[in-house]
Image (cartoon, rainbow, N blue to C red):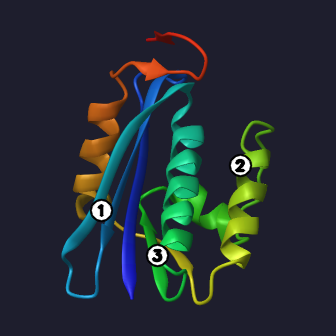
Amino acid sequence: MLKIYIDGASKGNPGPAGIGVVVKDEEGRVIRRLGRPIGEATNNIAEYRALLEALKEAHRLGGVGILICSDSELLVKQINGIYKVRAEGLLPLFNQARAALRGLRGAKVVQIPRRENKEADALARRSYGKEVRHPGGGGHR
């Protein structure tokens, strides 16, 4: 079973935001790290964008036996149907994530303590200050 650790962070809420994704194999070895800026976003949007990136990675890796680990209570409980999605800005991301999860066999999204998610958190926090490049032109901060 692959474990994918995710986190999203923003400096300000909303503010410059980034995501962090760490993929580990069955023995706990890191096989992929991804940290990148996502532009201006809230913390919750950044968390969902990290989840979507993790789901893309899960599909790329075959999509069987994936455990996605997040320290975001809101995201985990919304994805697992315990909390309703009330924020309009999260609903499209939630729907995309649920659709992507349906395409994976045996995938679960679980909540972990923040102390177990330090690597993904560090990637997300380092990423939110980086320049974002947009197709067809320059970037912005």
Looking at the image, is 93 positioned above or below residue 127?
below
Q: Name the N-terminal-most of marks 2 and 3.
A: 3
Mark sitting earlier along the chain (2/1): 1
Q: Horizontal placement of 65 versus 105: left or right? A: left
Type of amino acid under label 1 = Arg
The percent position of residue 93, horizontal first and vertical second, equals 71, 49
Q: Earlier in the sequence, mark 3 or mark 1?
A: 1
Quarter that holds the C terminus: top left
Q: Nearer the viewer, mark 2 or mark 3?
A: 3
Residue shown at the point (56%, 12%) measured from the top left? 137
Tag of residue 93: 2
The x and y percentages for residue 2 are 38, 81
What's the residue type where badge 2 is placed?
Leu
Q: Is residue 127 above or below residue 21?
A: above
CA distance separating discs 2 and 3: 21 Å
Residue 82 rendering spot, x and y as whole percentages:
70, 70
Q: Which residue is mark 3?
A: 61
Q: What residue is at 26 percent from the left and 69 percent from the top?
A: 31
3 and 1 marks in contact (CB < 8 Å)? no
Q: Which residue is mark 1?
A: 32
Which residue sits at x=46%, y=75%? 61
